[in-house]
Image (tube, rainbow, N blue to C red):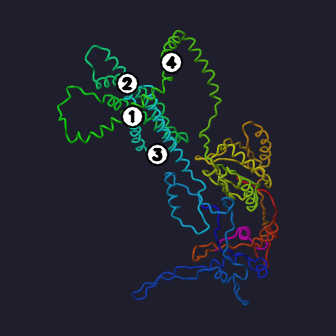
Amino acid sequence: QLHGGELEEVLVELDPQRLAALGLGGDEVVAALQRDNVNAPGGAVDERDDHYLVRTLHEARTPEQLGAIIVRSGAGGELHVRDVAKVRRTPVERQELSLVGGRESVELAVYREGDANLVAVADAVRTGMARLKLPAGQEIVVLSNHAEFIQSSIDEVVENTLLGGALAVLVLLFFLRDLRATVVIAVAIPISLLATFVPLQALDVSLNVMSLGGLALGVGMLVDNSIVVLEVIARVAAERAGTSGPKASRRAIAIDGTVEVAASVVASTLTTVAVFLPMAFVEGIAGQLVRDLSLAVSFSITSSMLVSLTLVPVLQAVGDHDDEFVEERPTRSVFALIAIPFALIVRAIALVVRGASRLLGLLARPFTASWDALERTYPAVVEAATRRPGLVLMLSLGICVIAVPRAERHGRTLVPELAQREFWVQIELPQGTALRRTDEAVRALGRAIEDDPAASLHYARIGSITQAGSAGGSVTGSHFGQIDVRLVASEEGSAAVEQRLLARMREVPLPGRALLRLGHPTLVAFGPPIEVQVFGEDPARTAAVARAMLPELRAIEGLPEVVPDDLEGRPEVRVRFDRERLGRIGLGVDTAALAVQRAIQGEVATTLHATDRQLDVRVRLPLADRSSVDDVAAIQVGLAGGVPVRLDAVAEVGPGHGPAEI
């Protein structure tokens, strides 16, 4: 969608005095333009062996040719369009303006299709913009790009997931103090994550903040399952070592330990899946938000279960060499010589890891001592708790009694507020405010913040606002304006900067009862959080009740901004026709109403196919003859015996107020 800028048309400005003197009506000028500016097919003719198409060519190509069209001809000569009107190519009377940094601009809003990927669309748009070559003095500025926020969020989740996996490995090395177990889990984590992508891709789940968050949760579950399997394998190995029988192999110990704990690991995983998987089938907006998270968690912990029960015991058994499998092999071979460098590299890595493990052990000795003390103390605490079950139950019940009311009072929201270092301020002036005055007010607000170092860029739209920032639908009107402000990163905090800039805007004197509203761009557009509607048969009485409610609502704590609909209505000029007067002069209401519309709004009579584009040809009165209520009353709506008939001769014309919306 395009906002701002100028479109062109051909304007035929009627001269009301000239029309009245010649006894002409605006409808005659429109009819002349429509019947004369025509190219039409005429069929085809066959002459001997040739087939010819017939076309009539009489279409105007320039405003001057339109002005030469004959409106009326007679004994007094020919009367052309140029004799009763000025014909010129001019910008369309604008209903909307767009500003960037206080300079007028053309804003192009690009929307993706419903099933298109936003990040891919944004990348394609940027690639296309990079190929554009603009004339000197013109530049392209990206005002808002939701893909940047999405991409940065995804990058942060990926980085934190990788960092979390690395920290998990370090923590395991610290607590388990077993290099083999730590390496096993370090290998199992990425394999489990890669396995999760297979069902996610099959179900068309994209990589987004929700699905990546689910994968991060899956990393934690993977570590839990793997630790359980490794601990049981270690316990079985310790039990076998304490027996007097033959020494058990690593393979046998890994198998026995995994079989022993497999049922518990499967049950634990399935209970978690039973919690998360049903969330994928929730309907409505909530279901759309949590579906990817639910599927990612379910598949990641399922893959972690499979990895912990298959890959982990296999890796734990690596290095087991039973005598019956040892065969005589040549001591030297080409492959052995090739493998020597790789073996040396692996040996060097093992030495580095072992050295790092010992270094961490030395650094962690104080914490290790505390942990050992906790291990010695914990059994006594558990024993004391089991001796006094009543006291433990009472303490648990007391905690629940304290926590439940607090949970009930906890705030609830569908989507948390997202800090994007960007906000918008909407200005709403009284209904009927001219676009020029709204433009002046918005420019004044922009000047109030342009010298603040926290504002990196501000851009504005006059004549429309968006209901929820850049994501919502537009509301148009000459009394609306909106300023979007992008902030630089600072230690002050976005909220404090927003309030400071808003305070500077509120100091600007604005016409009438101007309303300023602050908001933030959202990825999901919503209406007002609370909406109070007043119903009634009498509009005046309903508006009075709504006005009486405003002080009561504004007195409620937590409602800092109560914005009513326009209760006064939109100023308008009301025209009430007198059917008897119209009947006496032979005019219909439709003819008179169309004459009013033609004079003020204009009527597109035809089109002009210029060299560069197709332009509408609009017939209307000059701005000087349609700028007041008196001008409206003086509009010529028809002829009676060759005498012009003014609007106020057949209708009552006066100011009034109508509903702003129905």
The residue pinned by badge 4 equals: 374
**In the image, which disc is placed on residue 206?**
3
Q: Secondary structure at mark 2?
A: helix
The residue pinned by badge 1 equals: 352
In three-dimensional space, the C-alpha distance between marks 1 and 3, rounded to whole angstroms, equals: 39 Å
Q: Position of residue 177 (x, y in %)?
A: 42, 26
Q: Position of residue 498 (x, y in %)?
A: 69, 46
Q: Residue at x 66, y 56 (%)?
A: 459
Question: In front: 15, or 412?
Answer: 412
Q: Which stretch did the figure color magenta?
A: 583-605
Task: Indicate which label's residue lies in the foreground, 4 or 3.
Answer: 4
Task: Indicate which label's residue lies in the foreground, 1 or 3.
Answer: 1
Q: Is residue 126 left or right of residue 320?
A: right
The residue pinned by badge 2 equals: 263
In three-dimensional space, the C-alpha distance between marks 1 and 2, rounded to whole angstroms, equals: 37 Å
Q: Is the residue under label 3 in contact with that under label 4 (CB below 8 Å)?
A: no
Task: Indicate which label's residue lies in the foreground, 1 or 4.
Answer: 1
Quick one: label 4, few (<14), some, or many (20+) residues within 10 Å?
A: few
Going by the numbered disc 3, the residue's amino acid type is Ser
Q: Secondary structure at mark 3?
A: loop
| Sequence-first disc among 1 and 3 | 3
Going by the numbered disc 2, the residue's amino acid type is Ala
Q: How many marks?
A: 4
In three-dimensional space, the C-alpha distance between marks 3 and 2, rounded to whole angstroms, equals: 33 Å
Q: Residue at x 57, y 53 (%)?
A: 145
